[in-house]
Amino acid sequence: MSENELLKPDAIESDDDDTVCLGESFFIDNNYELATFTFGSHVLHLLCLQSASTDFDLTGQLVWPGARLLNQYISNNVELLQGSSALELGSGVGVTGILCSRFCHKVVLTDHNDEVLKILNKNIELHKSSEDSNSCAALSAEKLEWGNSDQLDHILQKHPEGFDLILGADICFQQNSVPPLFDTVKQLLCLQGKERCRFILAYVSRSKMMDVMVTKEAIVHGLQINEVEGSRSVISNLEGVIYEITL
């Protein structure tokens, strides 16, 4: 790539210090590949990347270890989801939410990144048209930035009956995102008016600081956080665990 190609249209050069500032489109990779994922007896075919840029929060373009952990837990405990409605936070390419659609009667997948939402919607359509989808759920995607009450209200207006389950897989890896995540979780749990409504979080430990922060933020928000017995395991050389979080 020539210098001129680098600067146009994805970069802007400052006249003051010759600094090159790269725009979002420079980091976007749309070369998705169809990948196969197997969880128990359930097989999913999804478009995703094998790696993605952390710039502009494009990490949702690939499947993270925590999603594999949560999906394995789901496939082993399908009775937890059968007949339920679920909302997933930070859905990425949709591997967890789409698996849930095989057991739930309704699943709403959410993400805040517009580029990630594009591939999420493609995977939803791919799943709906698949001969082996076995889906029994109404499946849809919505934009939701954690802590954004307007976006959350919009979703709840479309689904006034609420949700039985809130799901999250490997969504705690940036410290500044954890407080708004729990703001959104608490708002959802409080608004549902359902005693059984709970947040199931597949957490993968990458730093002791984040380990402490997740538990602390749950408690600060007045939530109970409990480790699901027998769920702790090693995945991709990292320790993961399933938490169940309630009011």
Image (tube, rainbow, N blue to C red):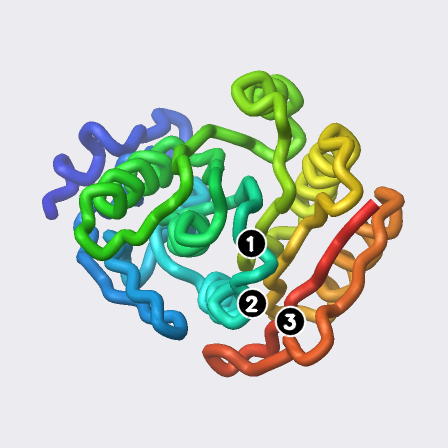
Left or right: 136 in relation to 74: left
User: For the image shown, how many numbered marks are present on the structure?
Assistant: 3
- Give the crowd class for mark 2: few <14, some 14-19, many >=20 residues within 10 Å: few
Q: Nearer the viewer, residue 27 or 140?
A: 140
- For marks 2 and 3, give the CA distance: 15 Å
Describe the element under mark 2 as helix, strand or loop. Answer: loop
The residue sitting at 66% across, 31% down in the picture is 147
Name the mark on residue 89.
none
Q: Secondary structure at mark 1?
A: loop
- Circle 2 is placed at which residue position? 77
In contact (CB < 8 Å): disc 2 and disc 3: no
Q: Position of residue 121 (x, y in %)?
A: 31, 36
Mark 1 and mark 2 residues within 8 Å of each other at the beta carbon? yes
Q: Amino acid at mark 3?
A: Val
Q: Tell me the number on the disc at residue 81.
A: 1
Compared to residue 16, the image places residue 6 above or below, namely below
Which numbered disc, 3 or 1, marks the residue closer to the eye?
A: 1
Residue linked to disc 3: 241
Q: Nearer the viewer, residue 167 or 214?
A: 167
10 Å crowding of disc 1: few (<14), some (14-19), many (20+): some
Spot occupied by residue 14 in the image (x, y as percentages of width and height): 36, 28
Name the residue located 83 percent from the left edge and 45 percent from the top edge. 247
Of helix, strand and loop, which one carries label 3? strand
Q: Is 119 left or right of 137, judged from the image as shown? A: left
Q: What is the distance, in whole Å, between disc 1 and disc 2 at their CAs? A: 8 Å
Residue drawn at x 25%, y 42% as measured from the top left: 128
Q: Residue at x 32, y 60 (%)?
A: 51
Measured from the top left, where is residue 135 in percent x and y?
34, 48
Q: Earlier in the sequence, mark 3 or mark 1?
A: 1
Please name whichever residue, 83 or 25, is drawn nearer the observer in this view of the structure. 83
Q: Which numbered mark, 2 or 3, is in the foreground of this view?
A: 2
